[in-house]
Image (tube, rainbow, N blue to C red):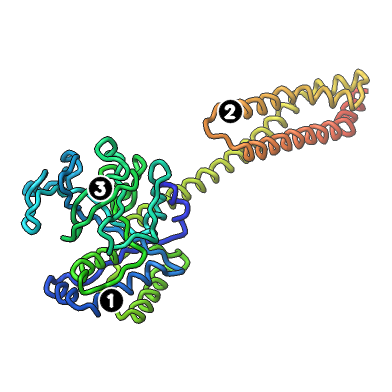
Amino acid sequence: MGNNLIESKNKDMFSITDTLTNPDDFYAFRQSEQKLLTVKNFYDNLNNHSTIKFLSAFDQPLQIENFKGGNIFNESYGNDDHTATIGTYVDDISKKEVFDVKSIQMNKNFYDYYAIELDENATFQWNTISFEKNVYPIALGANYKGLYKKGDILKGSLYFREFDFEVVGFIKENTSVFYKNDINKYLDDYILIPYPEKFNITPSNKEFIGMVSFSMMAGDIIVSKDDGLSYLQKQLAITAKKTDFYDYTILGVSTFSVQYNTMYELINYNKKLITSVCICIFICTIFIILFLNFKIYNRRSLRYFISYLNGDTFEKIYVLGLRDLILGDVFIVMSYISLFFIIPNRDIFSFLNILSFILVFIFVDALMLYHLLKKDIYSNFNTIQQRSD
C-alpha cells in the first residue's frame, strides 16, 4: 500500500459508521423500504462525491459449501476466541454443511485507492456487478492458487442469501490495505467481494439489502488537509439533508492518518535537522580550511620572499603558491567523488551542485592566495627588502 503514501501526505482520513447500535432500532429501520432508500441514497452520494473520496470496506465471512481449503482460510483462524468453530459445520438456517471463509467487501473507490491488482490482468467489470444476479464475481487471495482456478464457481451465501460466486482472478501476492487500524491487512487468505456501483431495493431483496447497505456505508473518507474535518462535516450534513439519512457518525481521525502524519513529520523533521547540521558543518569546514590555508601561507611566506629576492616574477611566485594549494584541493575533490560512488543512494543533481560549490571554493582559495601575495610583494616584501638594504 505504500504507493499511496505520497498522495496521502496532503490528505486526512476519517471513519464513518451508522449509529443504529440498538438491535431493535436496527431491525425496525430495515423493515421500511423508505428508510432503506435513505441509507442507499446516502451511500450513493458519498460513493460518487466530487470532492471527498469514500472508501467503503467491510470484512464479513462467506459461508462456502464443499470448501477445498484448509483452516487457515477460516474466519476464526488465529483468533483468541476458543468457542468459535474452525472447519465445516451444519448451518442452522440453510441446513447445509458450510465453511466460514475470510472475506472482505469493498467498493471501487477502495479497490482503486489501494491499487489492488489481479494476476494475468484480470479485472472486475464494475458496471455489470449486480446483487440481482445469482452469479456474483469474486477474486481470491494469492494463497488460493492450486485450490481453485479462474472461472470456478463457489456455492455459498452472503447475509443468508445464496449465490454462485464466480472466480474472476487471483489477487496479487502480498497485497495489503489499511482496514480498521490495521495498517497492513494482507489479503492473501481472503475472498474479495466487490460492491456494485448501483443497486435497487425491492420487496424480494429488502432483508438482504437491509444488511448489506449498512455494511456498505461503513468505511473511511479521504479529504484534503486544507479542507479538514469542518469541511467533511459540512459535506456530510448536506448529504444527510439531501437523502434524509441522519443515523451516521464520524469516528474521528483514524490510526492511518495518525501513523502516517507522525511518520511524515518525523522524516520531515529529521530531514531539516540533518540538512541544517550538514550546512553548519560545511560552513565551519570552509572557515577552518581558509584559516589553515592562511596560517600555512604565513609559514611559507618566507619561501615566497626568498623567491622574490632571487628575482622571480609575481606570476612565477603565484604558480609556486598554487602548487602548494593544489595537493590539498585535489585531495578534497577526489575524496568527495570517491564518497559519491561508495554511498548506495546517489543523486547526480546534488552531486553536481556540491562539486560546483567545491570548485567555487577552490577558486576563492586561489583568489585569496593572489590577494595575499600581491599585498606582500607590493608592501611587506618591499618593506623588508628596503630594511635589509
Left or right: residue 353 versus residue 4 is right
Q: Can you give x and y, in whole percent of width and height, for residue 360 in the image?
A: 73, 37
Q: Can you give x and y, in whole percent of width and height, for residue 333 in the image?
A: 67, 28
Is label 2 or label 3 in front? Answer: 3
Q: Which is nearer the N-term, disc 2 or disc 3?
A: 3
Residue located beneath label 3 in the image: 153
Three-letter amino acid code of the residue under disc 2: Leu
Q: Secondary structure at mark 2?
A: helix
Q: Residue shown at 44%/56% (left/top)? A: 8
Residue 75 in view here:
yes
Residue located beneath label 2 in the image: 339
Left or right: residue 25 versus residue 131 is left
Query: Could you say which quadrant of the image residue 366 lies in?
Result: top right
**Vertical relation: 123 (above or below) 356:** below
Q: Secondary structure at mark 1?
A: helix
**Vertical relation: 127 (above or below) 295:** below
